[in-house]
Amino acid sequence: MGSVNLDDIPSGSVCVIDTNVLLYAEQGSSVQAQRFIRRCAQGELSGILPQTVWQELTHKLMLAEAMMKGLVAEGKPALRLASKPEVVKGLSLYRAKVNALVDLGLGFAACTLEDLTKTAFKMQEKYGFLTNDAVVLAVALRLKADVLVSSDKAFHGVTEIAVHYPTDLRL
């Protein structure tokens, strides 16, 4: 199946969303990604995040908040933050952002053991994906999603599902 931009996703589609698209929408790096999230919030599209995406997004937003506030320096911020539990306790903006996505109606899909040990491993053998990408695809396939939404070039060439990308990235 081909890859198309986010504005071309048909209304009513079930969309499994990769972490990067959410970050690009949040950072204002893609107007298409922002419109896509709005379409999900309005119920025009069904947006579902695999468990791995919720976790990765939460982690990245937490690190970004700590760096933005000058509480950890660049260069291994997760390692630096792990040694500062008092700093972690004081962070809250990232939690509000994650809860806002929940409030928008984005869904949560748990990763099953079969997603990981059967489908994801098979996708890794076929495409050479890293584990999180393989799990995102595995969850999308199990859910029989219409579309996988990602800006990750690794998904170019996937034949099992339509992949849509933000084509307006400003990085």
Image (tube, grey):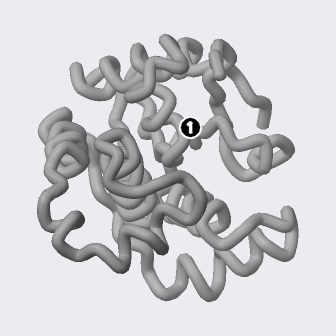
Residue at (49%, 47%) from the top-left corner? 19
Q: Position of residue 88 (x, y in %)?
A: 22, 66
- Name the quadrant of the C terminus: top right
Q: Is residue 70 shown above or below 31?
A: below
Question: Label 1: few (<14), some or many (≥20) within 10 Å?
Answer: many
Q: Disc count in the image? A: 1
Q: Is residue 113 shown above or below 72?
A: below
148 and 52: which is toward the camera: 52
Residue at (53%, 18%) from the top-left corner? 30
Q: Where is residue 70 in the image (x, y as percent from the top left)?
A: 35, 46
Q: Can residue 147 be seen in this view?
A: no
Image quadrant where residue 102 sits: top left
Q: Position of residue 16 (x, y in %)?
A: 47, 46
Q: What secondary structure is marked by label 1?
A: strand
38 and 168: which is toward the camera: 168
Which residue bears the numbered disc 1?
A: 149
- Name the quadrant of the N terminus: top right
Image quadrant where residue 137 sits: bottom right
Residue at (29%, 57%) from the top-left corner? 108
54 and 49: which is toward the camera: 54
Q: Is residue 73 shown above or below 165?
A: below
Q: Where is residue 160 in the image (x, y as percent from the top left)?
A: 72, 52
Residue at (65%, 84%) from the top-left corner? 118
Q: In this view, does 76 lie to the left or right of 46?
A: right
Q: Can residue 19 be seen in this view?
A: yes
**Three-letter code for the amino acid on which mark 1 is drawn:** Val
Q: Is residue 130 shown above or below 75?
A: below
